[in-house]
Amino acid sequence: MTTTKDHHVIGPLGSDFWRIKVSPELIPALAREFDWNRLGRRVMIDSLAGIITWMNPSSTHADLASASEKVVMFAGSFLKITVREKRDYRWKGPDDPQNVGLEADAAFYIGRNADAWNVAFRKGGPKATREFQTRTPPDLVVEVEVTHFDEDKPQRYASLGVSEMWRLTSTMDGDTMSMEILDLQEKDGQQNLEMSRVLPGLKADTLVEAYWLAWANDFRELGELLKEEMVLVNSPESDDDPDSSPPSPSM
């Protein structure tokens, strides 16, 4: 016997989460007939287990998801690494039925994949980038509000080929915030990291402060924080002064 708590929770940031289970055989049929986005803003479908999870984010959740873009874009600019942000996209594996998968609060191509996305866009426009996205998982996904409904997300993202996942836990007013960095492709299973591998030098502890500054739109302090805390990785073709302040990315 199940209770409402098995299917519905309010997250620590005030977002509304729902989770139901149906026969896995129904998932492909439902995908052909039903627009999952009618359920909520973020939808995850496990076609093997028949689990459908969706959420409607709170304003705080939306603010912190937006902060993810600012932090990652700033860090990429500081490291001189190309970043391509991808929001509101449902990531799915090659064997998934049409219109299933899962959406991250924020997702990014970083480095080579971001460069390849840009090349695809220049050569073939949106059609080429859609094709690129169907065969290329993001390098980084971010989840900013964690509940017990999210326990299988790291494995789901890992199975898609995502390299790294950030999980931010916070209260609604941000007075308590913590960050977890997961390497999803470690051969012995997901591994907690003290420092990001897709954005070298960006530490979990630094991310907490960086998110707060990005939430406050304090880009000057955010740039100073990254300058002080991150390990600058110069690209081979760059002769820029490593002590210079990072440029402000366009938002």
Image (tube, rainbow, N blue to C red):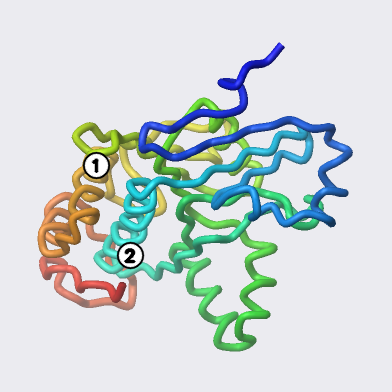
| Closer-to-camera residue (100/35) | 35
Q: Is there a contact, CB below 8 Å, between mark 2 and mark 1? A: no
What's the residue type where badge 2 is placed? Met
Where residue 128 sits, quadrant-wise, is: bottom right
Q: Residue at x 77, y 54 (%)?
A: 34
Q: Is residue 144 left or right of residue 184?
A: left
Q: In this view, does 69 lie to the left or right of 130?
A: left
Farthest-out residue, bottom: 123
CA gap, disc 2 and disc 1: 16 Å
| Closer-to-camera residue (238/156) | 156
Residue 73, label in figure: 2
Residue 154: x and y in percent read 55, 36
Q: Where does the N terminus fall, quadrant-wise?
A: top right
Label 2 or label 1, whichever comes before in sequence order: 2
Farthest-out residue, top: 1
Q: Residue at x 69, y 72 (%)?
A: 131
- Does dot 1 land on a helix, a strand or a loop? helix
The residue at which mark 1 appears reads as 208
- Does dot 2 land on a helix, a strand or a loop? helix
- Up the image or down, 114 lies above or below 119; here it is above
Residue 68, label in figure: none
| Closer-to-camera residue (163/170) | 170
How packed is label 2: few (under 14 Cα within 10 Å), some, or many (20 or more)?
A: many
- Up the image or down, 177 lies above or below 148; here it is below
Residue 90: x and y in percent read 62, 56
What's the residue type where badge 1 is placed? Val
Residue 89: x and y in percent read 58, 60
